[in-house]
Image (cartoon, rainbow, N blue to C red):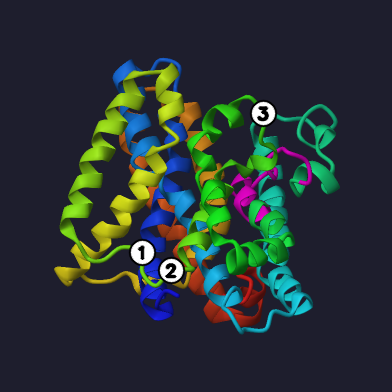
Amino acid sequence: MLNDYRVSVKCRNLAVVAIACVVAIHSNSLITEENSPRWMYLLCDVLFGKLTCWAVPFFFAASGCWFGLRECSKGKAFVLSHFYLKKFRSLVVPYALFVLLGFVSSIPLAYMQGVKHGDGLLSHITLTWDVFGVTELLPHGNGPMWYLRSLIILFILAPVWRVLALRAKWLLLPMACLALVTPPLIINGVIPFRLGQSSFFFLGLFLSQFKTIYKKHMRTSVVFGIAAIVMITYTVYDGGVGLMVSGVLPYIMLVFVWTSYDVIVATRVASPSWVSRYVFWIFGVHIIFLNWMLPPVRAVIHSPYVLAGMTLVFGTFAFVAALISAVVVERTNRRLYAILSGGR
């Protein structure tokens, strides 16, 4: 099995970078104006699509890895009722509360944008379906919560994944490679509930059953970095075949980021580990800040060049605002913070 402590430190630090990428992905809607030049669309695709495509897969892989390390060790007792209770507290409760918070915060925003009661937002949304994402739609008001929804679905079948990890771990490998073909399947609606990236969960679970993943090696980082550049160039300028090949890019980027971490740490750069304790909270609330910031800006400013510059500004502001809100809530009401963060 992998070294729990080393993997934990590495995952916590990379999670900070990953959540920053997620915030950047969601803030890039500023650039998507109809009058934006083609080069800006390509730049947007590279910065907020290709270079950050590893972020969400990383969280899935980390979740699968931790499940493998904590629940799939030989000789370790696995009490299903305790496991489900723990996941209910750490996933279901935060999911419901963050989704409800996002929905409530979106109501006044919708009315400010001219949506009338009975003819807009509230007439098309029911609390049991659209708001909480029970259907295949994104949870209204807090779309990124689809990630937690996917984890909840995956962990419902946790006993199955545990048996595979302990008795037939090599069967996890083809499941871990499903993302190679999921881009066209997702677009065609074959994979429901945005479960296309769940294959990275199985990748993490598969790798957790080995003693080591990758050693510290600069050559590996350089090779996969070059491969990523080639792949990004190809997928940006090729529409059809590029879609099929783009399924490979997240794997390449994951290896590149994972191995680059060791190279960077070897230079003894300051670690952002103190921020890692708030990653889940930042994930849960950043979209709420962006929902309130982006529409007014888009309504006033239409220059793609100005919007491009403001994208990074608002992405940074949303990240910092979410981080500050986490610190404030934790220090003023630890119990409330523990409930919302699922005990993290």
Residue 32: percent from the left, percent from the top? 44, 26
Quadrant (top left/top right/bottom left/bottom right) for the C terminus: bottom right
Task: Tell me if mark 2 has few (under 14), some (14-19) or many (20+) residues whose alpha carbon lies within 10 angstroms of its own.
Answer: few
What stretch of residues is rendered in magenta?
A: 134-149
Q: Residue at x 67, y 56 (%)?
A: 154
Q: CA distance from mark 2 to mark 3?
A: 34 Å
Q: Is residue 197 magenta?
A: no
> Hey, what amino acid is under mark 2?
Phe
Up-down relation of residue 92 to residue 304 (above or below): below
Q: Label 2, on which residue? A: 210
Q: Which mark is residue 189?
A: 3
Per the rendering, the mark at residue 213 is 1
Q: Is residue 148 magenta?
A: yes
Q: Residue 231: horizontal and vertical position, in percent?
A: 30, 32
Residue at the image position 36 percent from the left and 62 percent from the top: 14
Image-quadrant location for residue 130: top right
